[in-house]
Image: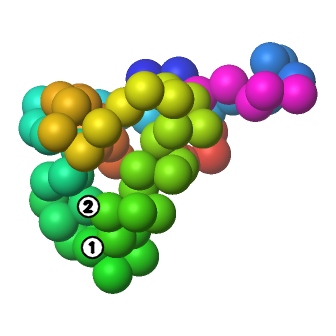
């Protein structure tokens, strides 16, 4: 997967995806072991910045990848 910098698309990172898992948004933080960092209200507010109508019951895809390594 390729991540590109919003301000400068010449800056990017390529990572190896290891797993994609579909689940309700409410289960994403617990799945990643991040429930304390991302309680439901924090997760929902963050996601609504990009997807204003999203609900905790909506299915999302969690994309897991290896850490970026500068090449």
For the point 17% across and 39% down, the residue is 57
Q: Which residue is mark 1?
A: 35
For the point 47% across and 41% down, the residue is 47
Residue 70, position as x, y percentages in the image:
62, 45
Q: Which residue is mark 2?
A: 29
Q: Is residue 70 visible?
A: yes
Mark 2: secondary structure: helix
For the point 21% across and 31% down, the residue is 58
- Decide which of tag 2 and tag 1 comes sooner along the chain: 2
Report the magenta residues as a range.
Answer: 3-7
Q: Is residue 20 visible?
A: no
Q: CA distance from mark 2 to mark 1?
A: 5 Å
* In this view, 1 is above or below 39: above
Mark 1: secondary structure: loop
In the image, 3 versus 69, the foreground residue is 3
State which quarter of the image contains the C terminus. Answer: top right
| Image position of 23 (left or right of 54) | left
In the image, 71 versus 47, the foreground residue is 47
Is 5 colored magenta in this rendering? Answer: yes
Mark number for residue 61?
none
């Amino acid at each position: 997967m390729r991540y590109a910098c919003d301000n400068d698309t010449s800056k990017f990172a390529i990572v190896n995806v290891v797993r994609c898992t579909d689940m309700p948004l409410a289960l994403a933080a617990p799945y990643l072991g991040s429930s304390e960092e991302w309680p439901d209200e924090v997760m929902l507010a963050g996601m609504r910045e990009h997807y204003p109508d999203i609900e905790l019951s909506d299915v999302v895809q969690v994309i897991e990848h290896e850490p970026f390594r500068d090449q």
